[in-house]
C-alpha cells in the first residue's frame, strides 16, 4: 500500500451507469470517481455487478443509462480497441497459438510499430514482470503464475492510462496469490498507472488497494480506504462482507459522552456514537471478533458473562463462539504458545472497548443506497 | 470405475463381429477379384496382375482419377467457403433463438430428404427447359439455355449442397470450444474486426476447417448417386467406374478401381490428419 | 464481441442462397408435380388431387410405407444395440491408446469406402454361392444355401453396418460429458456394476441414444443405394418407389411418394425431439 | 473441536501404502492410524497425494504396495460398494436425474430395504443436515450450500463406520464455507462417526480437525493435533504450508537454558531448544509473523532494528515486511482503531519471545520422512 500515491485528479469517472441483461439489472445507477495513479478495487460477491462495471469501463459492454469518462473524455460507444485502457482477463485469455513473445507483442503489432521497437518494448515488459528469457516458450509450457505474469505484460506493454484487472489472481493458489498481490502493488507503484481491479476476496482488496468500492446486487454500498470501510462500515452488508462481524440488534437506551448504550435482549452493550442515532431507535452494533476480549474483561464498561459453545484453532487466532443469553458472539483471541484456552461449556467474561464498536442501520439496505463520492 | 476386461470385450464382440464379417471379409474377397482376369464376358480365376496393368496403362483411367480428384477438390473448397461463414454466424449467436432455430432447420434439413427426391428436384431446376433457364431467358439475360445438367457444374453444386451440414457440424463444434474472451482480448489490445478474425478466430478454428475438409473430400471422392443421376454419364468418376465395371460382370476391373478409390481416400485422410496434428493448440 | 448484423447476414448470404435456390425451390417445384396427372406415358399439367387419391387408395402404397417403417425400426434398433456397447467401451477407456486407435479406425472406416464398393463386397459374401453359405455347407450346418441376398436380412445387416459410426458418434459424445464421479458415487453407495449401469449410466446417456436413433431412423427411411443394389427389387421401400416412378417419367406419382417420405421423416424427427426434451437433465 | 472426542482405538489403519500412476509416484509409503470417532484431515497442496490416499481408503484405487484396514479388517481389493465407508465427493456427484429424496434414498435402495424404512431414514437424514421439506426438489433447483447438505445426507444415511470427505467445501464461497465448517464439526460430534477429510486449506484443517496429517509430493510429513503441527512443525514444508512462517537460516552459536542462539547474517536470533541441535550446526529458526512484536520490542532478548519495506492491511491485522540487514521478516500486528501505524521506510525495533520460535532442519525434506503416528 502506498499512502503517498500521487493523486492526479479524476482519471475514470463513472456517472450513474445502469446496465440490464434482459430482466436482470446487473448495475443500478452506480457512480464513482477513480483518481489518477490510484489502485482502486471493486469488491463484492459473485453476481454483484462488479465485473459488469469493469467491462463497461473497458468498452466490452455499453451502459443502458449513464456514461463513463476516462481522462475527462466521455467514452460513449467507443469500442475497446480505441480506449486508453487494457484489461487483464479473469481466465487470462492468452493466445494459445502464439509464443510468450507474440502474445506480449500483439498490441504493438496492431499499432504497426517497427519491429525494432516491438522487440525492445516486449523485452522491457517481460523484465518488468520478472519473466526474461522465456519469450520463446509456448503458453501451455508455463505455470499458472508465469501465465499470470505474461497476461500482465501483454496489457502493460501498451502503456495504458488505466489497467483493468478482472479477478486477476483467482486462478492461483493461496501462497502464489499472496505473492502476486505484493507484486501487483509493486508494479502499480513503480509505473504510476491507474489500476482498477475487481475481486470477490475482501483480504485481497484490503491488502492491495488505495481505495475499495463495495458492491452487492448491482448497488455500490460504500467507497473508501481499506481501514475506513473496515472501521466504519456504512451498513450491515459491508460490515458482514469485509471480514467477520458480530452484528447485535438492539434499542438505543441513552448516550454517555462518546459512547451509546444499546439494550439487546437483556444485555446492555456500548458502542461509539455515530451522531445519527436517537434514543428508542432500533439499530445494530457492529463489533469485530478480534476486538472482543474474553477472560479478563470484567473491568470493561460493557462486560458480561457468556458460555463457550465452540472453539476453533486457526493458527494465529483461536476463535470462540460465545452465548450470552440470546446474544451470540464470535471472538477471535490471539493464540500464543502456552496461552490459556477456554473449554466448551466454560463460563467466561467477555466485553470490548466501546470505542471499538460502531453503529450501523438495522435494515439490510444502506440509508443512502447508491453510495459513491 | 472400470469394469472387467472380459465383460468389456464381450460388449464389443457384436460390433467387432459385424465389422469383421460384413466389412473386412467381403471387402477382402471383393478385392481378391482384382488379381483375377476378365475375358469374353466371364471371370477367369487365375492369379495375375494383368487387370492392374490394364488399368494403369489405359489413359482413360487417369482421366477418371483426375476427374474424381478434381471433383473432390472443387466440392471441398466450395463447401468450406460456404459453410465457414454459416458456422461463424451460428457461433457468434447474433441471430435470435427463433432465427437460429429456423436457420439450423434449413441447413440440416437436406439430411432428412432422400437423396433421390433431392436429385430429381435439381433435374427440374437445372434442365434446359428448367426453372433457372426459363427465368434467365424471360429476363433476357441469356439467349440460348445454359447447360447446367449432366455436366460438372450440376454435380458440383448439388454435392456442395448435400455436404454443407457435414462441413458446418465440425466447424461449428470447434468454434463452440473457442474461448470468446480471446476475441475480447484481441479487441482490447487494439485489433479491429478483421485483425481479430485473421489472427485469432481463423487460426484457432482451423482444426474444424481441416476436419470438415477431410469429411467433404472423402465423401466427394466416393459419391455415387449424384454423379450417376445428375452427371448423366458425362461425369466419369471412380465410384461410377466401379459400378459400371461390376454391372458388366467385369469384377476384376471394378475391384481394381475400387482399390484405387480406397487408396486415394486413405491418402487424403492421412494427409489431412497430418495437417491437423501440426496446427497450433492441438 | 459481436460483429454488425449487416456484415453477418452478408456472410450468411451464399449459404442461404444456395439452400434456397438448390433446395427449397427445386423441392417445391418437384412436389408441385404431385398435383399433376400422369396418363398414357406423359405428364398432364392440370391441378388435381387424383395422384394422391390413387396413392392412398392403392393397398400396395401401404405395403411400401409399412416396409419402409419396418426397415427403419429394425435397422435403428439393431444399430443402437450394437453401437451402444461400443460407445460405452470406448468411453470407459479400457483399451490402451493403440487398441483404441485401431478400434476407432475399424469402426469409422466404412465412411471412407464408397457405398458401391462396399455393396459389391456384400454381394460376394451373401450370395447363394457366397462365402457364408459355402462355409456353412462345408461345416455341414446347413444343406441348402440360405437366402441372404435380395431380401430384408441382407439390407438390414448392411444398413446397420453403414450407420454404425453415425450412431456411435452422438452416443460417445454424450458419454464423454457424463461425470464419471457419478458412477463412483453410485458404487460408493452400494450399487454393483449392473445397478450403476441401469440407474446412472443408461438414464444419463439416453439423450445420446435418442439422437443416434433419430439419425439412424431418418437415414434408414431415405436409404436408396443399399435397398436398390442388395434388395434386388424385392425390398420395396419409398425411396425406390420415388426412383422407379420418376424413371418411368411418372413424376406425379414419384412426387407423392417423395412427399410421404418427407412427412414421415419430419414426424419421426419431431417425435424423437419430443422424447429428448422430456429426458432428465436436459 | 472436541478435545474430549471418544477414542475408540484404531478405526482406519493405513500401512505403508504406495500408489503409482504410470511413472508418477502419487503416494510414497504412507502410514498412519485414524482413531474411532476422530475428525482426521489430510492437508496438502494439490497433487500432494492426499486425494489418492483417501481414494485408496474408499476402495476407488488400489495401492501398489501396503494395505488399508478398517475396523481391524484388511480391505484388500474390496470394491467401494462393499466397504463400510461412504464418500462425499469434491464436486458432490449428486445424481442430476433424481430428486433430493431419491438421491438420499439411493444407498438404502441398493440395500433393498423396505420402502417404509427408507422413507423414515431419508427423512431423518434430511433433518440432520437441516434440509427438511425439500425432499421433492430437483438437484438443479438447489443452491450450492443446499447441494452440499444433500451430498452429506446421502452419505450419512447409510450410517458408515467412516465418512470420507474429498475437499467437501471447496466449491462454496468464503462465508458459506466457514458456516459449513462449523456444521460439519457439529455433525461429527453428534454422530460420533469417524470423519476423514481431505483439504488444501490449512485454515479449514486446523479449524475442523482433531488431528491433521500434512502431505507433500506423496510423503506424509507430520501427523498431529492442529496446535501441535502449528507450534512444532517438523520441517520447513510443514512450517511454511500451515500459516505464514518466517524461516531464518543460521548457525547455532550456543545454548542458554531453554533457548538457543543462532547467528543469521550478522544478526543473532534466539529460539526454544529442540534437543537435537548442536553447536556449529546449520539450521532454520521458524517464527510466526503474529509472534513478532515491533515498535516497543527493545527489551526482548533478541531485539534488533529493521526498516519497514511494505505494509498491508488485512482487517484484523496489519502485515509489515521488515528488512533487518540480510534478514527479511513478516510481522503481523493486531490492528485496533487508532493503533499507531509504521510507515514505509521507518526504522523500528523488532523481536520476539524466544520460546515462541522453534528450530527446524534446514534441508527441505523431513529428518525421518514418512511420518506416521
Image: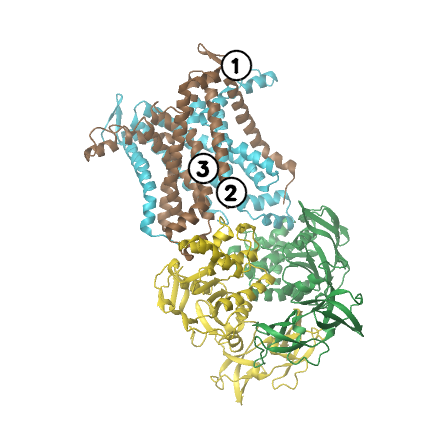
Chain colours: A yellow, B brown, C cyan, D green
* Above or below, comparing residue A196 to residue B215 in the picture: below
Query: Total of numbered circles in the picture?
Result: 3
Where is D267 relative to B232, above or below?
below
Toward which corner of the image does residue A332 lie, by quadrant? bottom right
Judged left or right of residue C194, residue A6 is left
First in sequence: mark 3 or mark 2? 2
- Same-chain check, marks 3 and 2: yes
> At x 80% / y 65%, what residue is drawn?
D276
> Viewer-proximal residue, B3 or C55?
B3
Q: Residues within 10 Å of mark 3 (few under 14, many from 20)?
A: many
Chain letter of the residue beneath label 1 in the structure image: B
What's the chain of the residue with tag 2?
A: C
Inter-mark Cα distance, 3 to 2: 14 Å
- In this view, the residue farthest toward the bottom is A257
Secondary structure, mark 2, is: helix
- Numbered disc 3: secondary structure: helix
Pointer 1 and pointer 2 on the same chain: no
Residue D166 placement (x, y as % from top left): 63, 56
Q: Which mark is residue C215?
A: 3
Q: Which residue is mark 2?
A: C173
Q: Position of residue A54 (x, y in %)?
A: 44, 64
Q: Is residue A115 left or right of residue D310?
A: left
* x and y percentages locating residue A246 in the rendered image: 57, 75
- Read off the chain for label 3: C
Quadrant of the image for the N terminus of chain D? bottom right
Residue C39 in view of the camera: yes
Mark 1 on the same chain as mark 3: no
- Mark 1 lies on a secondary structure that is loop
User: Which residue is disc 1 drawn over?
Assistant: B48
Q: Are marks 3 and 2 in contact (CB under 8 Å)?
A: no
Q: Quick one: quadrant of the C terminus of chain D?
A: bottom right
Amino acid at each position: 500500500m502506498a499512502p503517498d500515491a500521487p493523486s492526479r485528479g479524476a482519471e475514470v469517472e463513472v456517472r450513474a451507469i445502469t446496465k440490464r441483461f434482459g430482466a436482470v439489472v446487473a448495475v443500478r445507477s452506480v457512480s464513482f470517481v477513480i483518481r489518477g495513479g490510484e489502485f482502486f478495487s471493486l469488491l463484492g460477491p459473485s453476481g454483484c455487478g462488479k465485473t459488469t462495471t469493469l467491462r463497461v469501463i473497458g468498452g466490452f459492454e455499453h451502459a443502458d443509462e449513464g456514461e463513463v469518462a476516462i481522462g475527462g473524455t466521455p467514452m460513449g460507444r467507443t469500442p475497446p480497441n480505441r480506449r486508453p485502457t487494457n484489461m487483464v482477463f479473469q481466465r487470462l485469455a492468452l493466445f494459445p497459438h502464439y509464443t510468450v513473445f507474440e502474445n506480449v507483442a500483439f498490441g504493438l503489432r496492431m499499432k504497426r510499430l517497427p519491429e525494432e521497437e516491438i522487440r525492445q518494448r516486449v523485452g522491457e515488459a517481460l523484465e518488468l514482470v520478472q519473466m526474461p528469457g522465456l519469450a520463446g516458450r509456448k503458453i501451455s509450457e508455463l505455470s499458472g503464475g508465469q501465465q499470470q505474469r505474461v497476461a500482465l505484460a501483454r496489457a502493460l506493454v501498451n502503456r495504458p492510462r488505466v489497467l483493468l484487472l478482472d479477478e486477476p489472481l483467482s486462478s492461483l493458489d493461496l501462497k502464489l496469490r499472496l505473492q502476486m498481490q505484493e507484486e501487483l502493488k509493486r508494479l502499480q507503484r513503480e509505473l504510476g498507472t491507474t489500476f482498477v481491479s475487481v475481486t470477490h476476496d475482501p483480504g485481497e482488496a484490503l491488502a492491495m488497494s488505495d481505495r475499495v468500492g463495495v458492491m452487492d446486487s448491482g448497488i455500490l454500498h460504500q467507497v473508501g480506504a481499506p481501514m475506513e470501510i473496515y472501521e466504519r462500515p456504512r451498513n450491515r452488508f459491508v460490515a458482514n462482507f469485509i471480514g467477520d462481524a458480530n452484528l447485535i440488534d438492539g434499542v438505543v437506551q441513552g448516550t454517555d459522552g462518546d459512547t451509546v448504550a444499546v439494550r439487546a435482549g437483556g444485555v446492555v452493550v456500548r458502542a461509539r456514537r455515530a451522531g445519527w442515532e436517537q434514543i428508542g431507535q432500533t439499530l445494530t452494533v457492529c463489533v469485530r471478533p478480534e476486538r472482543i476480549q474474553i477472560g479478563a474483561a470484567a473491568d470493561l464498561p460493557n462486560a458480561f458473562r457468556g458460555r463457550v459453545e465452540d472453539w476453533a484453532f486457526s493458527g494465529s487466532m483461536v476463535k470462540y463462539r460465545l452465548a450470552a443469553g440470546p446474544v451470540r458472539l464470535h471472538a477471535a483471541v490471539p493464540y500464543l504458545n502456552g496461552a490459556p484456552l477456554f473449554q466448551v461449556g466454560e463460563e467466561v467474561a467477555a466485553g470490548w472497548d466501546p470505542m471499538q464498536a460502531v453503529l450501523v442501520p438495522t435494515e439490510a439496505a444502506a440509508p443512502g443506497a447508491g453510495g459513491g463520492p | 470405475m472400470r469394469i472387467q476386461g472380459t465383460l468389456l470385450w464381450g460388449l464389443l464382440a457384436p460390433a467387432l463381429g459385424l465389422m469383421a464379417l460384413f466389412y473386412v471379409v467381403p471387402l477382402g474377397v471383393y478385392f481378391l477379384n482384382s488379381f483375377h482376369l476378365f475375358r469374353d464376358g466371364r471371370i477367369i480365376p487365375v492369379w495375375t496382375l494383368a487387370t492392374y496393368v490394364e488399368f494403369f496403362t489405359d489413359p482413360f483411367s487417369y482421366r477418371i482419377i483426375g476427374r474424381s480428384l478434381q471433383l473432390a477438390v472443387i466440392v471441398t473448397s466450395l463447401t468450406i467457403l460456404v459453410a465457414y461463414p454459416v458456422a461463424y454466424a451460428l457461433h457468434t449467436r447474433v441471430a435470435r433463438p427463433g432465427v437460429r432455430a429456423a436457420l439450423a432447420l434449413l441447413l440440416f434439413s437436406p439430411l432428412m430428404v432422400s437423396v433421390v427426391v433431392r436429385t430429381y428436384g435439381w433435374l427440374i431446376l437445372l434442365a434446359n427447359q428448367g426453372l433457372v433457364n426459363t427465368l434467365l431467358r424471360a429476363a433476357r439475360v441469356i439467349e440460348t439455355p445454359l447447360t447446367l445438367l449432366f455436366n460438372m457444374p450440376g454435380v458440383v453444386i448439388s454435392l456442395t449442397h448435400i455436404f454443407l451440414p457435414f462441413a458446418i457440424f465440425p466447424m461449428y463444434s470447434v468454434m463452440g470450444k473457442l474461448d470468446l474472451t480471446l476475441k475480447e482480448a484481441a479487441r482490447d489490445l487494439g485489433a479491429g474486426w478483421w485483425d481479430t478474425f485473421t489472427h485469432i478466430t481463423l487460426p484457432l478454428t482451423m482444426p474444424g476447417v481441416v476436419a470438415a475438409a477431410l469429411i467433404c473430400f472423402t465423401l466427394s471422392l466416393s459419391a455415387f448417386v449424384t454423379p450417376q443421376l445428375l452427371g448423366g454419364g458425362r461425369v466419369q468418376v471412380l465410384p461410377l467406374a466401379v459400378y459400371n465395371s461390376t454391372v458388366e460382370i467385369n469384377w476384376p476391373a471394378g475391384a481394381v478401381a475400387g482399390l484405387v478409390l480406397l487408396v486415394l481416400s486413405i491418402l487424403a485422410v492421412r494427409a489431412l490428419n497430418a495437417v491437423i496434428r501440426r496446427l497450433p493448440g492441438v
